[in-house]
Image (tube, rainbow, N blue to C red):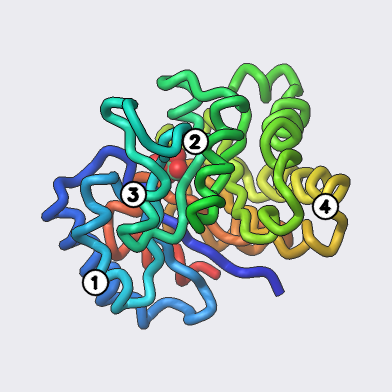
Amino acid sequence: MRRKIVAGNWKMNTTPAEGVELLKGVAALKSTAPSDVELIVGVPFTHLCGVKDAAAAAGIAVSAQNCADHESGAYTGEVSAKMIASLGAKYVILGHSERREYYGETSETLNKKMALAYANGLAPIYCVGEKLDEREAGKHFDVVRAQIEEVVFQLTPEQFGSLVIAYEPVWAIGTGKTATAEQAQEIHAFIRGVLAEKFGAAAADKTPILYGGSCKPSNAAEIFSKADVDGGLIGGASLVADDFIAIAKAF
Ligand code: 13P
């Protein structure tokens, strides 16, 4: 049995105080969700310290949404993997399409970030996914394969063992347009096959692959019912505690 995960990506939303309230709301409802679903909240850097204790008490894991591509030093405005880990976070989201698109993240940068995440005991949630024109041109398999080969294939088998992958078609993020459950299953199975080429079928079979992109209480059950979909990376709906928990209940 693979791990089931519902992870929230709060993106650049909420003040730290509002974030603590949101976390408390999720914590209060957590017992109503299936106990075998791991809940993760992906919070802004400024919130890591504030949510730490309440998240730990509730058994909710905390993730950052990015980390620096250098260990430490004169990199004004950056936040290192070590700083993030020291505040109790267990995960870091890397390669989100918004970071690739607006902050010019390339596979080269991401390889450095992945290495630093692992070196500091953080498990990456590595995001892949194609843009609308790439899907319309039938290139989505090639795009996703390249995002995996250029970054995930650089990991050691041991590192790969704690990796979480999120497939997020860019055309479905924040648009209200969700991939159909069949589209999600098709590409999740493809991703697992690509992972198996490098790390073997047994290891690939253990890797959680999450779906992200306009996932909400009304569509999560259908998407999560698919064999290779192991949960979700949730943007907008993770900002409402009831909706986030309703998605976890969709398993
Ligand atoms: P939405 O759920 O708001 O579409 O965002 C998805 C996402 O980008 C999660 O990382």
Secondary element at image label 3: helix
**Snapshot quadrant of residue 190:** top right
**Residue 73 drawn above or below residue 59:** above
Residue 145 position in % (x across, y down): 75, 33
Q: CB atoms at circles 4 and 1 under 8 Å apart?
A: no
Task: Bin the neighbour count of mark 4 within 10 Å (Cα to Cα): few under 14, some 14-19, many 20 and up.
Answer: many
* Viewer-nearest of discs 2 and 4: 4
**Residue, disc 4:** 199
Task: Bin the neighbour count of mark 2 within 10 Å (Cα to Cα): few under 14, some 14-19, many 20 and up.
Answer: many
Asked if residue 33 lies left or right of residue 210, the reply is left
**Residue 220 drawn above or below residue 74:** below
Q: Amino acid at mark 2?
A: His
User: Residue at the spot x=27%, y=54% of the render?
Assistant: 48
Q: Is mark 1 within 8 Å of ligand 1?
A: no
Q: CA distance from mark 4 to mark 1?
A: 37 Å
Asked if residue 18 lies left or right of residue 110, the reply is left
**Residue 200 drawn above or below residue 143:** below
From this viewpoint, is residue 219 visible?
no
Q: CB atoms at circles 1 and 2 under 8 Å apart?
A: no
**Residue, disc 1:** 54
Task: Bin the neighbour count of mark 1 within 10 Å (Cα to Cα): few under 14, some 14-19, many 20 and up.
Answer: some
**Residue, disc 2:** 96
Residue 197 position in % (x across, y down): 88, 46
Q: Earlier in the sequence, mark 3 or mark 4?
A: 3
